[in-house]
Image (cartoon, helix red, strand yellow):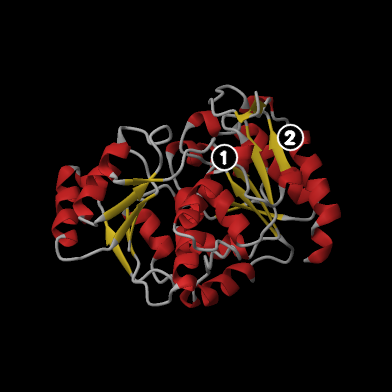
Amino acid sequence: MCIVLLSAVGDVVHTLPVVNALKRDDPTRHITWLLQPGPATLVRGHPSVDDIIVVERSRGWRGFLDARRTLRTRQFDITLVLQDYIKAGVLTRFTRAPVRLGFDRARARDLNWLFTNAHLPSHPRQHVEDEYLEFLAAMDIPAAPLEWHLGPRDGERAWQRQFAARFDRPIVSLVVGSSRPDKDWLPDRWAELARTLDHDYGLAPVIVGARTEREAATERAILAGAPGAVSALDSGLPRLTAILDASALVVSLDTGPLHMAVALGKPVVSLLGYTNPLRYGPYRRFHDLIVSAYGETMRNGQLCTDRRPGRMARIAVRDVTNAVDRWRTTYASTL
């Protein structure tokens, strides 16, 4: 069986319950996953994934041709196409599987349905995780119990202990960057939040994420305004998993680490405004900790799927600390 889902990190996390269910249903299934280099570091060593074919999109069509050469040496009975854009479609065709299962025509972007020969039944838009679980339903494979087995792997446990030993109080991870500016929160508000979490809540703020230009700018603002904060930007996905796992609380934008925190069972305060929290927010857990500036989430009984720029500035620091208060009342006592 081949899984076509190259990125992003959040989507990779949403795919893990699918591969775990596939392997649980039949442990002899051999599961190969096509992934980009970054997300591959999160999946490598996963107990339900037998093989990873890395697709280097940064190399353009040469990366796809390399993947094609590798795929020519493999034989698949079925390919599951969880990603719906044109290059994923090309790779789908390269797998040469007799059954290539993808989304129905209404939900497949970039004419991706042309590269598949079996399709999920039509269904209204729902949470991304639920849409991926539809692939299991189509094969009559039980999804429950939902399992991620995200990590940390054994190789990261010693590093995690060393990292956590630096702090004499609970860690709060701050996920300050996302894939696009419209999902970001203002750097000065991050700084004020970090200072408040440090001084008023007795938490140790740790800045996590990648080191993009936007994240580095927010990092500078936080370190200048909240001297008690520590930066762990650009630690890599395996160590990011270890940091999130060591955290008492996570505060996150709409980005991959939000879903990593949910998979690890870590309470997460989600800051959303550009995207609908019912589709892109935490899955089934910690909804009481969502801070949303998105507005109306349903219209005429259907999930709203429009993107809403300019909403994140509506989130005030007090909105976030109110959610932290709910965390302290509901979750902190169980740590």
Q: Are marks 1 and 2 in contact (CB under 8 Å)?
A: no
Mark 1 = which residue?
126
Residue 132 in the figure: left or right of residue 222 = left
Q: Residue 81 location, x and y as percent?
A: 35, 49
Q: Is residue 284 above or below residue 87?
A: below
Q: Dot 2: what SS?
A: helix
Q: Which residue is mark 2?
A: 317
Q: Is residue 189 left or right of residue 72?
A: right
Residue drawn at point x = 25 percent, y = 46 percent: 57
Residue 184 position within the rendered picture, expressed as x and y whole percent measured from the top left? 55, 34
Tell me if I can see residue 288 in this picture: yes
**120 or 186, which lies in front?**
120
Q: Quadrant of the C terminus?
A: bottom right
Q: Residue at x 15, y 65 (%)?
A: 73
Indicate which disc, 1 or 2, sits on the residue closer to the N terminus.
1
The answer to whether one can see residue 208 in this image is: no
